[in-house]
Image (tube, grey):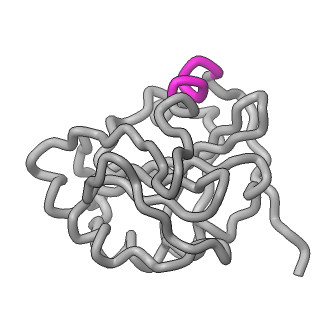
Amino acid sequence: MTPRRLAVSGVSVVALLVIAATFLVSGNAVQVAPPAPEAKVRGMCTALADALPDSVAGLERRDTEPSSPFTAAWGDSAIVLRCGVPRPAEMLDTKAAGGEIRGVRWLLQTSPDGRHRCTTALRKAYVELTLPAKYGDVGALMDLAAAIKKTVPRIQDGAKSS
């Protein structure tokens, strides 16, 4: 099977560099800055944590430090998930790159170093996935779609998200 690469342009470099700096690998745990979601999305993020797969894109799950139900990681040069992040400003940009994978819409961004940041769109909680350049295909997004659809409801047509 040919890898499917994420092709994205028009990225806020500053935003991606900030995200890239929020985690690093240390020992067996991945250091991840957990978000502080609003009360109305905490339950969704906790449910998502319980539904996440043990492997993503063929990579085994890793511990995060500090331990949080709002973060998860897989593999070395970790793929990192954070649930309950604020809505990215780029979400409102009509020229922003996006796509739908297995029923989950994503805002897709790529930094100059090739790192990808994908954030769910049209969901009641924003789930962010950061992928190192070497994992630039859509496999991780495909592997997470079922858990996200099961635990983070879509925003109904005409409803506003915060």
* Residue 71, quarter of picture: bottom left
Q: Position of residue 89 (x, y in %)?
A: 44, 27
Is 129 placed above or below 150 here?
A: above
Is residue 120 found left or right of 36 in the rendered image? right
Q: Nearer the viewer, residue 54 or 82?
A: 54
Residue 16 on the magenta span? yes
As drawn, the residue found furthest toward the right would be: 2
State the residue at coordinates (27%, 67%): 153
Q: Which residues are magenta?
A: 13-18
Which residue lies at the image location 75% right of the left edge and 62% below the top edge? 137
Locate residue 87: give its quadrant. top left
In the foreground, 57 or 78: 78
Rendered-image quadrant of the N terminus: bottom right
Identify the image quadrant of residue 10: top right
The image position of residue 81, as x and y in percent, is 45, 54
Quadrant showing the C terminus:
top left
Which residue does the image show at 32% across and 35% down from the upper left?
A: 86
